[in-house]
Image (cartoon, grey):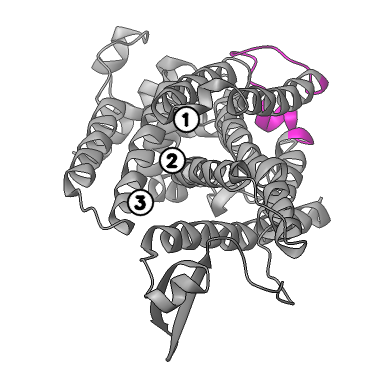
Amino acid sequence: MPWLDWFTLAARWFHVVVGVAWIGASFYFIWLDNNLKTPPKWKLEKGIKGDLWAVHGGGFYEIAKYQYGPETMPEPLHWFKWEAYSTWLSGMLLLSLVYYLGASAYLIDPNVMPLTPTQAVIYGVVYIFGGIAIYEAACRSPLAKSAILFAIFLVAFLTFAAWLATNLFSARGAYIHVGALIGSIMAGNVFLNIMPGQRKMVAAVANKQDIDPAWGAGAKLRSVHNNYLTLPLLFIMISNHYPMTYQHPQNWLVLVLMSVVLAWVRHYFNLKHQGTKQPLILVTGFIGFLCIALWVSWPSTSTNADASVSTKAITQQQIQQLIEQHCVTCHSAQPTDDVFKVAPLGVKLDSWAEIQQWAPKIMNRVSVTKDMPFLNKTNMTETERQLIAQWYQQSIQ
């Protein structure tokens, strides 16, 4: 329905805008906190814990952080919360519009687990909110007192979450649910810990009462968690454009390894903000990324296809028949698919000229990443995929 497509477009645009605002604020305040320096004596006497000077937009800024709080509560006092809430709400709206309303097309893969749309949606909701509950329990346990132990737990927890998702949902649906879980954890950190701690702190300062150090420590801990989770979450948001990641046989491991590498890269910038430069972190991060890319893209030597395929010349008629059988239901000027009413990405394969135009992409998506036909709705066989591959190799020789 066109109106639903426009509504989804608006929701996606809004999600990106508020997400940029949230991530920008998160990165800025982590940078700000790591760059505060001990102020001069007269500022210390006023209760200022740290300060810094900055220049931007043609002006100078003097920024100070108080040890306790200002003598009188300023008005207005700017809070940073709606960026997080808006990002989560719009993200959940998108998840519902695309993956829950379209569960049969986007969320369910019968080859992974045969689910009804209702079952898939229930599993998705339980997966997200159950994951939040486990994370919150860990944060409130003695485990959170050790940064190293909690980091190990978090990696193990997200590894299990990635494995579980890929054994419940379609590959794309699995990745997006891991992203939804991480995003929900991050928004939950704001809603369940950071904001309550800040409200208590503001009330204490306004009433000239003592501040419990646990309020600030808890909020700072959750902010750090959000900081390290940001780059993995951004990777998941764009991963749907790169099927070699989510279509890999060990897609859950690809996701985990990429997340670890990206969190490691984020660690470099956090240290840099504190005045510690460790370029080896970036080097090892790049090496890690390269190793993942080589592993994922390494040609497979195993095949279940008929050996006779490789000895026969592939004709134009064979390829057109395959394309008509498996592809033009979606990739056509007039699609007949029950979900896609407009050719995805504008790729139309009605004529031989159009098939030749898109030959490299057909080869990549059908025979390499194997994410097309979409969720293999038309049951393309491995032999047919190899026919496409052999035809493409013949065409470029």
Residue 246 vertical position relative to residue 112 in the rendered view, above or below: below
Q: Tell me the SS state at disc 3.
A: helix
Quadrant including the C terminus: top left
**Residue 246 has which mark?**
1
Q: Tell me the SS state at disc 1.
A: helix
> Can see residue 33?
yes
- Give the amino acid at mark 2: Tyr
**Residue 140 has which mark?**
none
What is the CA distance from the residue labelled 1 to the residue labelled 2? 8 Å
Q: Which residue is mark 3?
A: 270
Residue 223 vertical position relative to residue 10 in the rendered view, above or below: above
Asked whether, in this view, residue 102 is left or right of residue 44, the answer is: right
Between circles 2 and 3, the one closer to the viewer is 3
Residue sitting at x 29%, y 10%: 302
Asked whether, in this view, residue 128 is left or right of residue 167, the answer is: right
Q: Position of residue 260 (x, y in %)?
A: 37, 33
Q: Which residue is mark 2?
A: 242
Residue farthest bottom in this picture: 58
Between circles 1 and 3, the one closer to the viewer is 3
Q: Position of residue 242 (x, y in %)?
A: 43, 40
Residue sitting at x 51%, y 47%: 351
Find out whether the residues at labels 1 and 2 contact each other: C-beta distance under 8 Å: yes
Q: Position of residue 300 (x, y in %)?
A: 28, 18
